[in-house]
Image (cartoon, grey):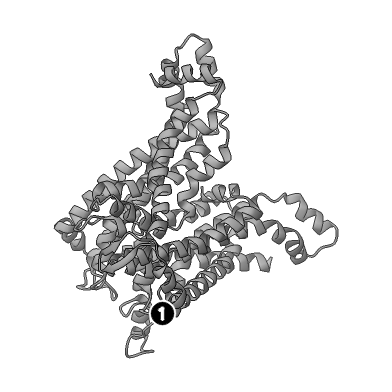
Amino acid sequence: MGSAMARALAQDEGVDARPWVLLAPALLALFLLMVVPMAIIFVFTFYEYIDVAVDRPAFQFENWRWFFEDSFYHYAIWQTLRISAITTLVCALLGFVPAYFIANTTYRHKWLLMLLLILPFWVSFIIRQLSWVHVLGSQGIVNAALLWLGVIDEPLRLLYNEATVVMGLVHFLLPFMILNIYVSLEGIDRNLVSAARTLGCTEWQAFREVTLPLSLPGLAAGSLLCFVLAGGSYVTPLILGGPDNFLFGNLIYDTIMMELNWPMGATLSVVLLVLLGSLVVIYGRFMGLSRLYKSLN
Amino acid sequence: MRSWSLIRFYTLLVYLFMFTPIAIVVVLSFNDAQFGGFPIQGFSLRWFEALANNEPVVRAFRTSLLMGIAAAVIATTLGILASLALMRYNVPGTNFLNTLLIAPVLVPETVLAVGLLLFMRWLDQPRSLVLLLAGHVLIALPFVVLVVQARLVGIRKVYEDAARSLGANPVQTFFQITFPLLMPAVFAGLLFAFTISFDNITGTLFWRPPGVETVPTQIFGMLRHSISPEINALGTVMIVITVGLPLLAGAVARAFARGRL
């Protein structure tokens, strides 16, 4: 029936309606579950907070005033940007070499290295995060080994600081970085490096002048993903961070789920969206988003 | 070459960084000790047994499983239809539509979560399983679209045209040509969406109705006290499901492909 109607429509207006029939369910879902909710968040930022879980529709700027005047929020933004930037940098430093190795190895079981790279995406996120408690916690393998060796008498307090939050985020985001750089490196014409070598470049020069610049798009895509995903997270600090190592997402979670202050939670959400969304938009302008889709695959 | 062996060693270290902690969870889940950490005091399956008798965990498991299946079916259906439209027809604004379909990945998940929650509040609806399901569909959809589009590229329209010219009607063509060719994309989409839903915690912590737990939120709640050996066992079970399932599916698919050749 659908297609009959579509054909009728197509004949009438000269437009093929069939693709729109196919698209309709997905677009409707996105409209209801994303577009409308985003608009409602924005509307809520002007609502008036009365008491816990009570608010009143209004058009006033009290929430925004709070946000702009309370330096705690500014500190939270700074801390979120700092932790995200460090995480991204560490991912890039840790990820480039393995990506280079996988792209250039003649190892017979290269597919295995690739599979191992994708595997972490399938291992439960929360398990991956809590696994660090077994490494660095008071009963973790590091402390157990040091105690057993007699180096220390008491377990060291290695967990619940900014470094462990960064490490947890890196552990979660590193595969994104490696995959993106790998895709870039894999696309480089091998002859270019050979040409550079024949023209007298040393191996290192050829890398610096040819390979590295050509891998930058992958590095940029990986960095964007790492930064945005790190900056938007809040579960990692809850598991691996101390009370001071919160991210902006933690403020949103606390404001919405603990304080039940929805207008303020909405305001903070818009802030986070603008903060991270502007990075995506800037990236999209310079690099185009299609590369990002490819890298997510 | 010395620099190459350095590169190889560095790569090995990075892989160790990624996998040692996960391996430790699996090892510790077989530990006979009373607590969830080191030292190791012998092999035991008792924590898996305890898990099977842990009523809340079993309930969370059932919720996650149902949620995962429902989200996978819905997201894959929506994703395949949309992908077919974008790849088969000349739709004006294809780029924009593609970006829209992928957009849920580009918006921080926390913000998506707050948005849906406030929408429910705006409608005066309580948090329900439907909200949780809708959220999971929203998060899984972009990934389904990406995976499915990658698979659909390989299906060329000539096969369908051939079927039609040989006298098949559109319905026959769909069920005998298009659908079988689509199957790998369907499976990939289902699997991907299921894994995403089964693993989700960021949005789920916002969306779940009071008293409802999925496996990740259940683990999260149990973490509040300390890491019990049961958490390790649950982690191992999760790993077996979310890693073993796709690997098995891949192996089966390959075996089928080989059998046909």
Asked if one can make out residue B207 in the rendered structure from this viewpoint, the answer is yes
* Relative vertical location of residue A279 with respect to residue A5 in this rendering, above or below: below
* Relative vertical location of residue B32 with respect to residue A244 in this rendering, above or below: above
Question: Could you tell me which residue is drawn at 65 percent across and 56 percent down?
Answer: A217
Residue beneath disc 1: A161
> Where residue B256 appears, x then y in whole percent?
42, 32
* Relative vertical location of residue A137 with respect to residue A47 in this rendering, above or below: below
Outermost residue, top side: B167
For badge 1, the amino acid type reads Asn
Give residue A50's quadrant in the image: bottom left
Q: Is residue A250 left or right of residue A112?
A: left
User: What is the total number of numbered labels drawn onto the structure image?
Assistant: 1
> Where residue A229 appears, x then y in whole percent?
47, 61
Q: Nearest the camera: A81 or A98?
A: A81
Q: Secondary structure at mark 1?
A: loop
Q: Nearest the camera: B233 or B124?
A: B124
Q: Nearest the camera: B35 or A288?
A: A288
> Where residue A67 appears, x then y in whole percent?
43, 72
Outermost residue, front side: A59
Question: Could you tell me which residue is drawn at 38 percent across and 44 percent down?
Answer: A32
Q: Is residue B144 left or right of residue B37?
A: right
> Where residue B203 appears, x then y in whole percent?
35, 57
* Relative vertical location of residue A49 with respect to residue A217 in this rendering, above or below: below
Chain of the residue under the numbered disc 1 shown in the image = A
Question: Could you tell me which residue is drawn at 74 percent across and 66 percent down?
Answer: A204
Q: Is residue B153 left or right of residue A35?
A: right
Asked if one can make out residue B252 in the rendered structure from this viewpoint, the answer is no
Q: Nearest the camera: A70 or B52?
A: A70
